[in-house]
Amino acid sequence: MNKKMKKVLLFILSALIWISSVKADEGMWLPWLLNSQTTDAMKKKGLKLSAEDLYSLNKSSLKDAIVWFGGGCTGEIISPNGLILTNHHCGYDYISNLSTTADNILDNGFWAKSYAEERPVNGLTVAFVVRVDDITNEVLEAVKGLTEKERTAKLPQIYKSIIDRVTKGTHYEAQCREMYKGNAYYVFLFERFTDVRLVGTPPQNIGKFGGETDNWMWPRHTGDFSMFRVYSGKDGKPAKYSPDNIPLKAKHHLPINLKGIKSGDYAMIMGFPGRTNRYEFSQGVKIATDIVDPAIVALRDVRLNAWREQMNKDTDIRLKLSGDFASVANYCLG
């Protein structure tokens, strides 16, 4: 999903299970709200983890290996030393910003052979979820009896008060989020790292093969991945970039299964999706498909055509505009 699109921090678990009849049994859950009935159903499909293994405040769990990458994507910690696997399109803007005509890693690819060769990425952050607290009752009580306009104006004040409280005396950050059309509210506590370095990327003719047409319309045959690493201060806490920083000692990481998968294996996705309107009324869907989306696509297509004309003239211009072009194209063609 495009990293610059407006995101709702909905930290969810989406389980997609394939069985021999090719029927998908789907679910979309908040990890901290998984109950025994849900996990029992998941285990019958092949899950070998407990709810505590997925989300825990008392021990390392899967939530500690799933990171909020760049403010708009999901990444996975896949080594004890902070190695991150994410999509190529999630790293695309950062990779293009590191590229020049003399050292064009966007087109040619890049692989660091040592920690020393890993390249610092300006502006890239990675955040870990520390915990999620239910603040529904507190928020609803504070806006009780207000009109919609009054409610909208007061919510930022309520959020600030809650954020100040939960982050007091810590180096953590927090964000309050509304869910289920204002029927639930949660505060997310994050630990954010700012020293993140590029480890490897395939050339974009592999990482972006098929472009947005394949991304949205056709089965994909692309190497849509890139790799980064989180660094910390020697105390293990977030620190500004320094040659003295060390690879993060991860609380939890995903093991790599070299045996591959077979038909019937249990599979699930855990991460930070974009905004979802899965419960939209039919009228809302019609407005989006017939009025709003066509207008957005038409307007953005004007911008893309103007950029494409200039990008085709000069490699340096192309590299400078590649990230923005990919960002708009991802939304426009989607």
Image (cartoon, rainbow, N blue to C red):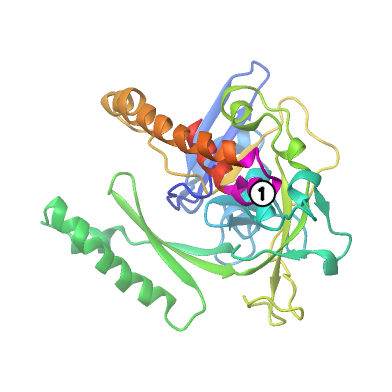
Q: Can the viewer see residue 334?
A: no
Residue at coordinates 49% horizontally, 50% vertically from top-left? 4
Q: Position of residue 162 (x, y in %)?
A: 33, 70
In this view of the protein, which residue sits in the foreground, 329 or 142? 329
Numbered disc 1: secondary structure: helix
Q: From this viewpoint, which residue is outermost toward the front? A: 313
Q: State the image coordinates of residue 96 (x, y, percent, origin top left).
A: 67, 52
Q: Which residues are magenta?
A: 311-323
- Neighbourhood count class around disc 1 (C-alpha, 10 Å): few under 14, some 14–19, many 20 upward: many
| Horizontal relation, residue 178 to residue 155: left or right | right
| Residue lying at 33% horizontally and 29% vertically, measured from the top left | 288
Kind of residue indicated by mark 1: Leu
Relative depth, front residue between 288 and 230: 288
Whether residue 56 is visible, yes or no, is: yes
What is the x, y in percent for residue 79? 77, 59
User: Residue at horizontal 72%, vertical 55%?
Assistant: 99
